[in-house]
Image: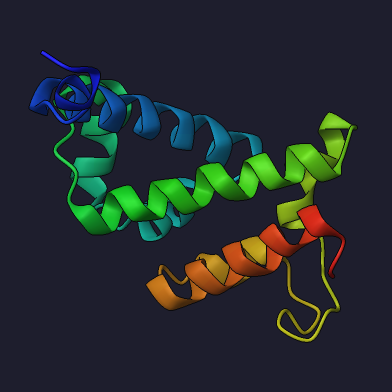
Amino acid sequence: MTATKAQKSPADARRKSVSGLKAAFNILDKWGCTADQAQAILRLPKATYYKYRNDPESARLDRDQLTRISYLLNMHQALRIVFENPENVCGFMRKRNHNPYFHGRAPLEVIESGDFATLYETFRRIDTLRNGLW
């Protein structure tokens, strides 16, 4: 079996899905998200959220949820590249931002609506920090 086929196996996809969910939970915790915020951002019903928090291996995520997780991981990675101080990496999402898109709101306030387009746009704005374009 080639490496490409192995990467596309259901078991590998499942493993990546569970790993991504665990990482997303850790990131959301570091950002200081409440359970309600995390549920909205990940688009998980309350009971499912708590089930997956207690047993991530039981998670069955759809493409939308996996994409949301990807945006969270990439936002956090961009912040880790931009900031050396862990306090800034984790605190950025709670800090008021006066750039045009955020209009004085913290990025976390913007994405807590759970709206997919808002999550994407926030990811895009934070990702531009990597290139110093903000």
100 or 37: which is nearer to us? 100
Q: Residue at x 82, y 67 (%)?
A: 96
Image position of 97 (left or right of 39): right
Could you tell me how many numbered marks the image carries?
Answer: 0
The residue shown at (40%, 27%) is 22
Q: Quadrant of the N terminus?
A: top left
Q: Residue at x 26, y 49 (%)?
A: 46
- Specify the color scheme: rainbow
Vertical placement of residue 94 versus 134, above or below: above
Q: Is residue 18 left or right of residue 116?
A: left
Quadrant of residue 79 within the rendered picture? top right
Q: Classify residue 77 by image quadrant.
A: top right
Q: Which of the image's four quarters has the C terminus?
A: bottom right
Residue 88 in the image: x percent, y percent? Answer: 85, 42
The picture places residue 20, in percent across and down from the top left corner, at 38, 32
Question: In the figure, 4 relative to 61: above or below?
Answer: above
In which quadrant of the rendered view does residue 59 lie? Answer: top left
Q: Nearer the viewer, residue 82 or 5?
A: 5
Q: Is residue 115 visible?
A: no
Most distant residue in the top direction: 1
Determine whether 93 is above or below 80 in the image. below
Question: Residue 31: image x %, image y %?
Answer: 65, 43
Residue 88 seen in the current view: yes
Is 35 left or right of 100, judged from the image as shown?
Answer: left
Q: Name the residue located 90 percent from the left edge and 32 percent from the top edge.
A: 85
